[in-house]
Image: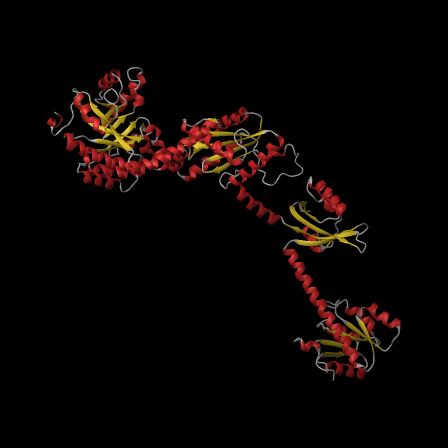
Amino acid sequence: MFGQSEEDDEGRSPAHILLVDDDEINLLLTATALREQGLQVTEVTSGEAALRLMQQWTPQLVILDALMPGMDGFATCRQLRGLPGGELLPVLMLTGLDDDASIERAYDAGANDFFVKSTQWSLLIGRVRNLLRAARVQHELMCSRAKLARALDLARMGSFDWRPAPRGLRLEPEALRVLGRSPRQTLGLRQMLRALVGAERHGMAALLREVLRHSTVLDTDATVALPDGRRRIIHIEAEPEFNEQGSLCGYTGVLQDVTDRRMIEDKIKRLANFDALTGLPNRRQLIWRAERALEHARHQGHGFALLLIDLDRFKGINDTLGHGAGDELLVEIGRRLRSCLNHSDQLSDLGSDIHPLRSHRVLEAVGRLGGDEFVALLPEVDSEAQAEALAEAMLRVARAPVLLDGREYFVTASVGISLYPRDGHTVVDLLRNADVAMYSVKSAGRNALQVYRPHLAGMGRQKLELESALHKALERGELVLHYQPKVEVGGNRVTGVEALMRWQRGTELVLPSEFISLAEETGLIVPMSEWAIREAARQIRNWRDQFGLDLSVAINLPSRAFERTDLVDQIQHAALLHGVPLRSIELEITETGLMKDLQEVIPALHRLTQSGVGISIDDFGTGYSSLAYLTQLPISEVKIDRSFISDLGITERSSAVVTAIIALARSLGLRVIAEGVENDRQREVLCRLGCATMQGFLFAEALPAQDLPDWLRRVHAPKWPTSELMALG
């Protein structure tokens, strides 16, 4: 009759309508018209029947006859509004009356629309369609609002608006939940301000006055105390609204609980700006603070200082006790260093509530630059002495014993100091110069402080130049070996020689004290040691071929050379290449170097002695060797350090130490050599104590290889091993 319904065109199920009319003819005609449009219709003839039915089922639309016996349409409409699901149900009132009073009465009863009874079915169908469409839109809107409310709850967000008095602040239920209130509570602006924590209350009040004065956007965070005592960080954001005249009429905005997000952000910031191990500011944070301090010092015209603190011999503890103990040590030293000054962990930019002339004080801190290096930042210093006093305090706390694994250990530190503006105008310059000063302390013996001086930079450049030249020395063949005889005094014979490295740098002969430590630091000591083995083997063969000398040569090797798995192969290859017996080669390792990497060195020592190479412990008595280890080591000789020889015949303590070393060596079946013998007094005491083999300036300095035969010829007292004595005649 009227075509297909709109609902069917859009693919939805036909709407189900409850039709209520006591007139059966009108009921039939109306139902027929509705069904012809594809609508489902349930018919009842009274208001009471309609209400009973709706207690079990809810239609999508109710069409009520206004005038019915018993309960009329107006009363029925009012009662169905109280049923579950009935408050939003669309109701169309049918009336035969076309007067204003009936229409108003229908609306008062809760009807959505009315229709004057007639046979104009198209008008009725149009009203029905409009009501169904409006109900559907309203339902979708309510679903969207429910989803939005759920999303706001999940995001811990809610909206609000503010209007001038008398309306004031109005918070949506979601916003009230964010603030820990029930949706039915009301919260005014004053109550909201009272919920803020501490000084934030006055700060927020001042901010709101400023925002209202200039009609600007509000965007801030505030810490709010909830009714249950919890504190939450609330982000507040609002935009102004203006009327037709352009005047401010209020604000609309949202507030959101960002506590969890802020905690995550703060954690990320902390990880990015603070050292994970010690909790101190890291390099990034230190640079940031130093730059801010530099800006303030430049603006205010005062000085500031950087102190670079490097732990001495930290690697020894880290390698010996393990990285866990090393980490414990770094944490403890970091804690001690920060106690020496007014350390601040503040991360964010300086707030406006900090006094502008004193705000730089929060930059003062100790941080970990990396590894075992720390930096102390003094944002304002009056003199060099002030920075030195802090450095002295840090050296004192670093020297105190540290308890690791139940035992006490001792570490020291080297401190370099640079001052703005004298030692640099940028953070990079100040750090570099503090580093130069610190390394000058390392070179001078450690455990001290040094303020930067310009001449120290020259020393640093000299070190770089020396390192570069040392790299080229191997390539250019500038390294040479000099040989110092070992003399058996009682038997008047030379038992062998010790090979000592020299560097022929142009016309200058550089002594090992000036380059060996640098070679060890740069790793060049390993290829230099390999060269020394080859050169010593070559020289042994040369002496044998030219002079008939059958000398053994002792070569000093660093502990790291013994860690190489191919050391035995290198020595065997060098001996085979030059045709000399392995017994002609001896290796010396210092006691300190031996004990530092003992477990790694022992296997190499056994392989070497099994192949025929002798092992000697150099500088014996200066390290911290265990007597238990000495009984297990495959060594054949110990050399008494020159520090014990120098005072022989002068102090009883030196004689006692030397006597103990000789007795220990004899009990273990080891040869003993005294090095650094320079006068007859020392020689006589050593002979009396039972040490007959010596080396030192009393007999000969270290000689070039070509000069050793001449020395042997000139000195008639000593005898030397030879296969052809006439070769020198």
Location of residue 682 (image quadrant): top left
* Residue 636 seen by the camera: yes
Measuring from the top left, give residue 554's x and y in whole percent.
24, 31
Q: Nearer the viewer, residue 609 or 405?
A: 609
Left/right placement of residue 574 relative to residue 11 reads left
- Furthest toward the front, the residue is 507
* Residue 560 seen by the camera: no
Left/right placement of residue 54 relative to residue 23 reads left
Q: Nearer the viewer, residue 729 or 174?
A: 729
Quadrant location of the N terminus in the rendered image: bottom right
Measuring from the top left, give residue 547's x and y in whole percent.
15, 29
* Residue at image location 34% in from the left, 34% down from the top: 596
Residue 90 vertical position relative to residue 211 in the rendered view, above or below = below
Left/right placement of residue 414 relative to residue 146 reads left
Quadrant location of the C terminus in the rendered image: top left
Left/right placement of residue 149 relative to residue 636 reads right
Measuring from the top left, give residue 421's x and y in whole percent.
55, 30
Measuring from the top left, give residue 72's x and y in whole percent.
83, 74
Q: Nearer the viewer, residue 502 or 305?
A: 502
Residue 214 vertical position relative to residue 453 in the rendered view, above or below = below
* Residue at image location 79% in from the left, 55% down from the top: 243
